[in-house]
Image (cartoon, rainbow, N blue to C red):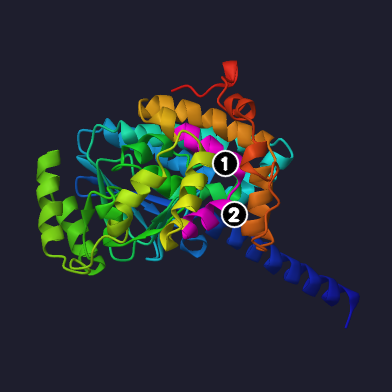
């Protein structure tokens, strides 16, 4: 074969390879993590990364935030609906691994991600248009922030809710310090410290969701919602109530924590995490022992930060809670346990984090208080 033909063949192969690469780049550009569309009089946000359980990243936050603002100011948009693609997850959380990598090297993502995520959480909490989150599938961390501050949250039998942050050296952020202490009794503190998982109808019974609708009825519900003409919040309530009344799945099952609610209120009533652990150990019941064992695996620093966060958040506005949580997020970025927790749970998956300090007693009040200190110029502003 002549050199010319060889060269031509090589060039052609290179050209095809380049075309393939460009094609792939274009397809990843036209495959956004978020779909934003107008359906009838509704603005519809679809979180569209099903392969990674719809994990939330900064690009997605930067797409949702301005669009939400546009719809809020648009006379042609009456409601906003947010949903997850793929059926497995609404949104399983923030893209924590990327944040960890940035945090290790002092990259801007560790600052920008939390700042912009919390600004979006606040925009959802203050949205003047009825905001309806269809929280089907896994709803954790960042996914909770995208839903729980909205006016309506609809769970299905496939919903799995948790705030498992103390297991990775973080704290239940995205406004967790606002909504958790407002749940009944000490339930919010219990969920925050232990990362306990609520499923299906229990997500509504706990007060995290406002409604429960069977999964198979969700397409019909969406159709009815987008067809509403200039609905008031009461009109939407009526539609959701009627779908809830048609949903009988698990209706006869009691709330999973029903028989433990008075125990939770009693055992988790303490001015310190050490006090809670003492209560649990002294109680000695199977339930108490299980919770004590769970807490023993969590980051001691995270447990103490979370306890103080919820105590303070109980009397603050959502905005003030988010300012506080931004300070805490940056303290975690400067600390040790977040990186170690992500390594143990998400990267190496050995589930054996080496916390530092390793016991509650070694975490001083002073070190916890420092996490809540103002960042001055760098504080979160709305």
Can you give x and y, in whole percent of width and height, for residue 329 in the image?
Answer: 57, 35
Q: Front-most of 366 and 219?
A: 366
On the rendered structure, is 365 left or right of 179?
right
Residue 294 is inside the magenta segment:
yes
At a point 58% along the width and 25% down the height, the residue shown is: 369
To which quarter of the image does residue 266 belong? top left
At a point 56% along the width and 32% down the height, the residue shown is: 328
The kind of secondary structure element at disc 2 is helix
In this orientation, does residue 231 appear? no
To which quarter of the image does residue 235 belong? top left
On the rendered structure, is 148 left or right of 336?
left
Q: Which residue is farthest bottom?
A: 1
Q: Which residues are magenta?
A: 289-309
State the residue position of label 1. 302
Can you give x and y, in whole percent of width and height, for residue 352 in the image?
Answer: 67, 59
Q: Which residue is farthest right?
A: 3
Magenta segment, prevailing SS (helix, strand or loop): helix
Q: Nearer the viewer, mark 2 or mark 1?
A: 2
Residue 257 is inside the magenta segment:
no
Numbered label tally = 2
On the rendered structure, is 189 left or right of 167?
left
Other-residue count near label 2 (Cα within 10 Å), few / some / many at <14 / 14–19 / ≥20: some
Q: Front-most of 292 and 41?
A: 292
State the residue position of label 2. 297
At a point 29% along the width and 37% down the height, the residue shown is: 71
The disc label shown at residue 105, or none: none
Can you give x and y, in whole percent of width and height, for residue 315 in the image?
Answer: 35, 26
Can you give x and y, in whole percent of width and height, for residue 311 in the image?
Answer: 42, 31
At a point 12% along the width and 64% down the height, the residue shown is: 246
């Amino acid at each position: 074969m002549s050199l010319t033909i060889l060269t031509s063949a090589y060039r052609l192969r290179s050209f095809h390879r380049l075309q393939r690469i460009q094609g792939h780049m274009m397809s990843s550009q036209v495959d956004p993590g978020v779909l934003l569309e107008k359906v009838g009089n509704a603005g519809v946000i679809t979180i569209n990364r099903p392969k990674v359980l719809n994990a939330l990243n900064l690009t997605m936050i930067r797409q949702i935030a301005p669009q939400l603002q546009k719809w809020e100011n648009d006379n042609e948009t009456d409601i906003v609906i947010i949903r997850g693609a793929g059926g497995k997850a609404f949104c399983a959380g923030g893209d924590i691994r990327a944040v960890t990598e940035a945090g290790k090297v002092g990259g801007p993502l560790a600052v920008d991600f939390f700042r912009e995520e919390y600004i979006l959480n606040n925009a959802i909490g203050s949205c003047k248009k009825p905001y309806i989150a269809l929280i089907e599938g896994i709803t954790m961390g960042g996914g909770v922030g995208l839903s729980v501050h909205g006016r309506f949250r609809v769970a299905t039998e496939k919903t799995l809710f948790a705030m498992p942050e103390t297991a990775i050296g973080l704290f239940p952020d995205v406004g967790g310090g606002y909504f958790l202490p407002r749940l009944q009794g000490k339930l919010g503190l219990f969920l925050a410290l232990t990362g306990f998982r609520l499923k299906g109808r229990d997500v509504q019974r706990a007060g995290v969701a406002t409604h429960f609708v069977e999964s198979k009825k969700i397409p019909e519900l969406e159709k009815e919602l987008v067809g509403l003409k200039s609905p008031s919040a009461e009109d939407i309530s009526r539609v959701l109530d009627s779908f809830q009344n048609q949903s009988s799945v698990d209706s006869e099952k009691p709330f999973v924590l029903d028989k433990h609610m008075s125990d939770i209120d009693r055992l988790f009533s303490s001015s310190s995490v050490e006090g809670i652990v003492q209560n649990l150990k002294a109680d000695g019941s199977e339930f108490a022992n299980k919770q004590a064992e769970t807490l023993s695996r969590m980051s001691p620093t995270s447990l103490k930060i979370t306890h103080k966060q919820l105590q303070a958040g109980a009397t603050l506005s959502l905005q003030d809670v988010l300012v506080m949580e931004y300070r805490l997020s940056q303290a975690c970025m400067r600390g040790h346990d977040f990186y170690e927790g992500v390594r143990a749970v998400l990267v190496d998956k050995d589930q054996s984090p080496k916390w530092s300090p390793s016991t509650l007693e070694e975490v001083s009040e002073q070190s916890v208080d420092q996490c809540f200190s103002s960042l001055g110029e760098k504080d979160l502003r709305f």
